[in-house]
Amino acid sequence: MLDNPKNDPDLDRDLRAVWHPCTQMKDHASIPPLLIERGEGIYLIDRDGKRYMDVISSWWVNLFGHNHPRLNAALKDQADRMAHVMFAGVTHSPAIDLACSLVDLTPSHLTRVFFSDNGSTSVEVALKMSLQYWQQTGQVERVRFIHLSGGYHGETLGALSVCGIDLFREKFEKVLMENIEVTGPDCFRCPYNLRPESCGAECFEPMEKTLAENAKTVAGVVIEPLVQGAAGMKMYPPVYLKKLEDACASTGAHTIYDEVAVAFGRTGALFVCGEHGLSPTFLCLSKGITSGYLPLAATLTSEEIFQAFYGEPSSMKLFIHSHSYTANPLACACANETITMLRENNFLETLQPKIKYLGEVGNRLRELEWCGEFRQTGMIAAMELVRDKKSREPFPPELRVGYRIYLEGLKRGVFMRPLGNVIYFIPPLIIMEKEIETMIDAADESIRAVLKK
Ligand code: PMP
């Protein structure tokens, strides 16, 4: 029935029983999924022993590599004590330690940590807290969120309703919350013909206008700071965030920073908000929080928000939101070890030469005739492929250029699942300079292999 080139019975079993995420399963009828058996540092190793460099950190979660002895030990140690306990009416030191660390490390007004278990839920929590805050403080008409075109915040219905990417939304449009989409920054195709290094975020204008026009009905603005990941690692300068903070302060709207993808060192700093002196009302964290070991998320907020929920039981002001695996102790133990490693031996400073090197080596990709833009923020880099450099005309989706490059990458031992026509790199932070070079060379060769005439 299925053409299974590797002839492994487990692949047949997979194809009979498993439905993979974000995947046209018919693709697997001809090209089966990789059957990964082990991880070792930045490498994934399949059943035949072939190694693949995990240059996208397994969907941007992994910081310290696979099968890390210290993370393994932290996990085992916690497993020997207790794997899980519910988190209402109960607490435990892994969660207490983690909450206190997050409060210490993030901007000082963020004093309260609400745990959940993935990036989407961290956003759901922020949206619901924001809405309930306004209900309980007398501004009941604040029921809508502003989000950016190209923004991505997860795929559960609430989070999806603040996404600005049609691909994810269109089938569900009729049931999504009525929020407001604003044209966001697009530095590659900047309508003002400006450069991100020197502009003043002139593209903030639509946001400013929308906030002013809807000042009484907007609960908050949801944004991915500096890098719009799922949109294709689209990057924009911090001045946009500064303007957003000022505009929200003057209209009273909350700022919801979704740092799910960019926190914990990806940009070279622990948190974007801290690095740029910004004060979001809510900060959403997940992915790298456990260095890719276990699902965990945290939504941080201020004392002012917390106090609006605090009161006599009869007031019913409590936040009614729970997930069975809230603050899972195993996940919290991995997160605590992750944070320890991020903070010791000047780890973040040691990233600086790597960031520089990634930029230098990545520059080689600029020479390719299909390179529309090579962009970089810290340890995140991306190359946007175009059919024509001058006009910036994109490749039509039906050519599946990114997917074909991905398959070429696999042949060269590099796992770089693209985002449409964007080939990107968000490797584990422990990647070495020579591995950065291998990664870029493999991308270069794979692109040429697919696009050469
Ligand atoms: N927000 C951002 C910025 C993300 O990049 C993602 C995941 N790619 C999410 C939210 C959703 O996270 P999860 O897949 O863990 O639900």
Image (tube, rainbow, N blue to C red):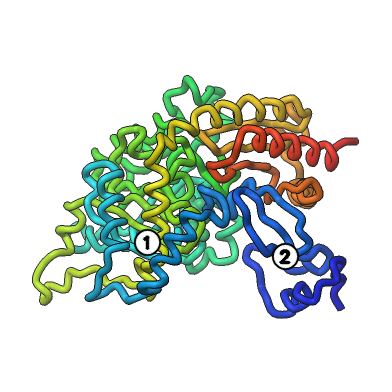
Q: As shown in the figure, which amino acid type bears the numbered disc 1? A: Cys
- Residue 436 on image: x %, y %: 65, 36
Q: Residue at x 71, y 37 (%)?
A: 438
Q: Quadrant of residue 426?
A: top right
Q: Residue at x 79, y 62 (%)?
A: 48
The front one of 81 and 444 is 81
Q: Residues within 10 Å of mark 1 (few under 14, many from 20)?
A: many
Residue holding disc 2: 35
The numbered dot on residue 105 is none
Label 2: which secondary element? loop
Q: Earlier in the sequence, mark 1 or mark 2?
A: 2
Q: Residue at x 33, y 72 (%)?
A: 322
Q: Quadrant of residue 158?
A: bottom left
Q: As shown in the figure, which amino acid type bears the numbered disc 2? A: Leu
The front one of 185 and 217 is 185
Residue farthest to the top?
198
What whole-number distance in Å separates the C-alpha atoms at marks 1 and 2?
28 Å
Label 1: which secondary element? helix
- Tell whether circle 1 marks a residue whose Cβ is less than 8 angstroms from ligand 1: no
- Residue 374 on image: x %, y %: 64, 31
Residue holding disc 1: 332
- Residue 349 on image: x %, y %: 44, 31
The front one of 172 and 451 is 451
Q: Residue at x 48, y 63 (%)?
A: 294
Q: How many marks?
A: 2
Q: Is residue 107 visible?
A: yes
Q: Give the vertical position of 412 relative to 116 (above or below).
A: above
- Residue 90 on image: x %, y %: 24, 74
Q: Is residue 323 visible?
A: no
Label 1–label 2 contact, CB within 8 A: no
Q: In which quadrant is the C terminus drawn?
A: top right
Q: Give the vertical position of 382 relative to 128 (above or below).
A: above
